[in-house]
Image (cartoon, rainbow, N blue to C red):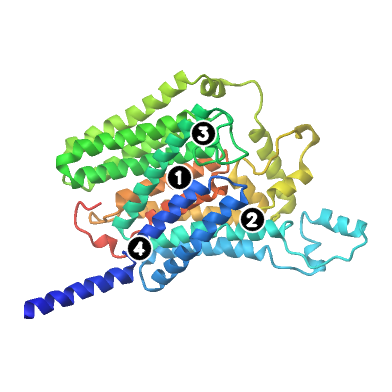
Amino acid sequence: MWASRSESVVLTRYKSEAVASGRDWYPAAVLALLIVALTCGGSSSSPISAGIVRICAVPVLAVGLWRMAQGRASHAAAWPLWLLAAAAALIAAQCIPLPPGLWSELPGHRTVVDAYRAAEIPLPWLPISLTPAATWDALLGLTPPAAMLVATLTLGDRDRRLVAAGVLVVALASVGLGMLQLAGGEHSPLRIYAVTNANSAVGFFANRNHFSGFLATTLPLAAYLATRWARQAPAFSLLWIAAGLAVGAIDAVGAASTGSRAGLLLVLIGAAASVMVILRARARSSAPRWRFAALAAPAGLALCAIGLIVLAVNPRLEHRVQARTGPELRFELNPQVAKVGLDFAPFGSGAGSFAAVYQMYEPVSSMGPAFVNHAHDDFIEVWLEAGVAGVTLIVAFLVWWVTATWSRLQGRRGDRGAALALAGSFVVGMLLVHSLVDYPLRTPALITLFAFACGLIVPCRGENGGGPGAS
C-alpha cells in the first residue's frame, strides 16, 4: 500500500511538472511556429505572408512570456531580451506624433514641410517616421522573432534539438519543392509568390538568394544533430553519420544550384562551420574518436567539393561568378543609401521607410523597370531608417553575440548545450554575412530563424549542471 501511494505521488508530481513546463504541447507549438514562418514567410513584401506568421506568433509569445515569468529562462537571457526591447522601443518612438515646431526641424524633413506649405495646409503633428504606417508594420513585424526568441529561451536542451530537427525537415522539403519548380519551368504553379525568380528554384521563398541562404545555414545544425545522435546510439553511429552527410549534401546542392553567388559562399562557410561544430561536440564526448573523425573530415571536403561540382555543371552560376561586364545595382545602390542616411542623421527616416525615401533621392540615371524595395545591405538600410540609435543597437548586438558565444565555448565540461550553441552562433553569423549583400532578415522566415539561433546561444536554465559529455 505504501509503495503504491508513493508511486502515485511521484507520478502526480511528474505530471504536474510536465504540464507546468508546457512539455505536453509548448515545444510542439514552437516548432509549428517555426515551420509556419519558414514555409509561409518567405517574402519581404507580402502582407498576407507576414500576417499569417504574425497571427501564429501571438499565442506562442504570450505563453512564452508567462513561462519566463515563472522562471523558465536563465539569467543570461536578459541581454538579448533587453536588445529586443530596445529595438521595439526605438521603432515605437519613431511613431510618436511631435508638434510641428519640432518635427519640421528634424534633418531630412524639409521636403515634407515644403509640400504642406505649397498646398497651403497648416503643419500637423507628425512623427519622426516619414511613413508611419510602414513603421507600425515594422513594429508588428517583430512579433514572430520576439515569440521565437522568448520561446527558445524557455525551452530545454532536448526541446531545442526538436525544433532544430524541424528546420532540417523544412529544408529538405524546400529542396524537393525547388526541384519541382525547376521541372515545371518559369510558369510552374508551385511558385508561391508572383514576384519571384522565375528561372530558379526558390522553394518556399520569393527570392533565390534567401532560399539558398536558408539552406546554407542548416549545415551547422545538420552537423550537430548527426553528431549528437551518433553518440547517443553507437550501434547506429555510421547510419547517423551517413544521414548527416546526406542532408548536408542535399542542402548544399540545393543552395548552389539556385545560381546565387551569395548562396555558394555561404555553403562554403557552412561547411567549415560544420567541421568546427563536430569537433566541439567531439571534445565534450567520451565516444571513440574515429566516429567523429569519420564525420568531420569528409563533411568539409564533401560539401566544398559539392559546391565546386555544382559550379562546374551550372553554366548560369559559372557565368554569374565570372561576370565582370559592369557594376551591379547593389554596389551602386549602397553608397547612395549611405549618403541619404546622412541627410536624416541622427534620427533616421523611420523603420520601413526605405522604398519611399529612396524614390525621393533615386538618380534619374538609375531609374528603370526594376522596383527597389530594400537596400542590398541590411546594415546600411538600418542606418538610413534608424540613424545613430539603430547603428548603436547593431554594435550592441554584435558585442553580445561575440561575448555570449565565447562564454559558452569557455564554459564547463558539463555544459550540455555548448555544441548546439556553437551551431546556433554560426547560423547567426552566416545570416549577418548574408545581410552585407542582401536583406534576408527582412523576411519573416529568416528573421524568425535568426531569433531561434540567438536563443540557442543562451544556456537553458540549469544547463551547466549537466554531466560530462552531455553536449
Contact, CB < 8 Å: mark 2 with mark 4? no
User: Circle 4 sits on which residue?
Assistant: 25
Lower sequence index among marks 2 and 3: 3
Lower sequence index among marks 4 and 1: 4
Lower sequence index among marks 3 and 4: 4
Q: Name the residue furthest front.
A: 189
Which numbered dot is residue 388?
A: 2
Q: Where is residue 168, by image quadrant?
A: top left
Query: Looking at the picture, which amino acid does disc 1 mark?
Result: Gly
User: Circle 3 sits on which residue?
Assistant: 262
Lower sequence index among marks 1 and 3: 3
Mark 3–mark 4 distance (CA, rounded to whole Å) = 38 Å
Mark 1–mark 2 distance (CA, rounded to whole Å) = 22 Å
Viewer-proximal residue among 285 and 118 = 118
Mark 2–mark 3 distance (CA, rounded to whole Å) = 28 Å
Residue placed at 45% from the left, 59% from the top? 149
Disc 2 residue crowd, few under 14, some 14–19, many 20+, Cα 10 Å? some
Under tag 2, what secondary structure? helix
Q: Is residue 377 above or below residue 138?
A: above
Query: Looking at the picture, which amino acid does disc 4 mark?
Result: Trp
Which numbered dot is residue 429?
A: 1
Quarter of the image with the N terminus is bottom left
Under tag 3, what secondary structure? helix
Question: Going by the image, does 218 lie left or right of 352?
Answer: left
Query: Looking at the picture, which amino acid does disc 2 mark?
Result: Val
Mark 2–mark 4 distance (CA, rounded to whole Å) = 42 Å
Place of residue 300 in the rendered image (x, y in percent of width and height, measured from the top left): 33, 31
